[in-house]
Image (cartoon, grey):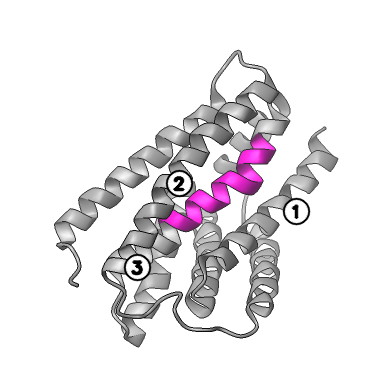
């Protein structure tokens, strides 16, 4: 079976991004208890995750020339561990060139003080799943699904750029940091051909970051 037109894929993907932005605003709803807001976030984000998962699986069934997810890859845990280590190494190195906390992180810190349960559930579990589906699984297979070295490299770089811009929409060292993290996550997905691996790397990285927030902000 053939893939849909580029224009149609672009329209669909832009729609997915808009929905993701709407879903993320639920976390910041005012005047709602932390526990109730966490439950609402799980329900809303869970529905969106189900929607994205069905789209991702359908895309692989309809047009999957690289046979993503169909080949057995040995040693996936090795790539998960290397991915987590690489992300923290990038953070340590590039953080030295950041003048201050990024705007994205500052917003998370401020919201965490108000709704720690909601932010932890969303940041450690829900957001990594959504972002891996959007920026790795769907994006890389929507636009760079040819089985060539050039397509694989461009898939990693462009998905990392998009991931970076969604977290830091300005030319800055923070953008470079988020792009580097995106390169690591895309590389893990590319190497393991299993979106669950990049999701796990993302969750572990965010989870350890939230542990630090619990220790320093509470």
Q: Quadrant of residue 64?
A: bottom left
Residue displayed at 32% across by 86% down: 148
Classify 109 as above or below 68: above
Q: Which residue is mark 2?
A: 50
Which structural element holds mark 2?
A: helix
Q: Earlier in the sequence, mark 3 or mark 2?
A: 2
Q: Which residue is mark 1?
A: 208
In the image, which residues are magenta? 119-134
Q: CA distance from mark 3 to mark 2?
A: 16 Å
Q: Earlier in the sequence, mark 1 or mark 2?
A: 2
Classify 129 as above or below 106: below
Observer-side mark, 3 or 1, equals 3
Residue 171 in view in this figure: no
Find residue 23 and report its horizontal and vertical position in percent: 45, 35
Q: Is residue 130 magenta?
A: yes
Q: CA distance from mark 1 to mark 2?
A: 26 Å
Residue 90 in view in this figure: yes
Mark 1 is surrounded, within 10 Å at the Cα level, by few (under 14), some (14 to 19) or many (20 or more) other residues, namely few
Pointer 3 and pointer 2: residues touching (CB < 8 Å)? Answer: no
Query: Disc number at residue 60?
Result: 3
Q: Quadrant of residue 80?
A: bottom right
């Amino acid at each position: 079976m053939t893939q849909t037109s580029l224009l149609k894929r672009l329209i669909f993907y832009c729609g997915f991004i808009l929905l993701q932005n709407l879903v993320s605003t639920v976390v910041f709803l005012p005047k709602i208890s932390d526990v109730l807001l966490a439950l609402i976030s799980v329900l809303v984000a869970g529905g969106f995750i189900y929607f994205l998962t069905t789209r991702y699986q359908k895309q692989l069934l309809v047009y999957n020339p690289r046979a993503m997810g169909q080949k057995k890859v040995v040693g996936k845990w090795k790539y998960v561990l290397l991915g987590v280590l690489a992300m923290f190494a990038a953070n340590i190195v590039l953080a030295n060139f950041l003048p201050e906390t990024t705007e994205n992180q500052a917003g998370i810190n401020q919201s965490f003080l108000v709704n720690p349960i909601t932010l932890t559930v969303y940041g450690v579990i829900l957001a990594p799943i959504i972002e891996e589906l959007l920026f790795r699984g769907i994006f890389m297979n929507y636009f760079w699904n040819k089985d060539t070295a050039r397509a694989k490299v461009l898939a990693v770089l462009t998905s990392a750029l998009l991931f970076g811009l969604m977290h830091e929409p300005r030319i800055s060292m923070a953008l470079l940091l988020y792009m580097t993290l995106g390169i690591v996550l895309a590389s893990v997905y590319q190497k393991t051909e299993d979106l669950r691996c990049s999701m796990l790397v993302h969750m572990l990285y965010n989870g350890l970051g939230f542990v630090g927030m619990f220790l320093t902000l509470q």
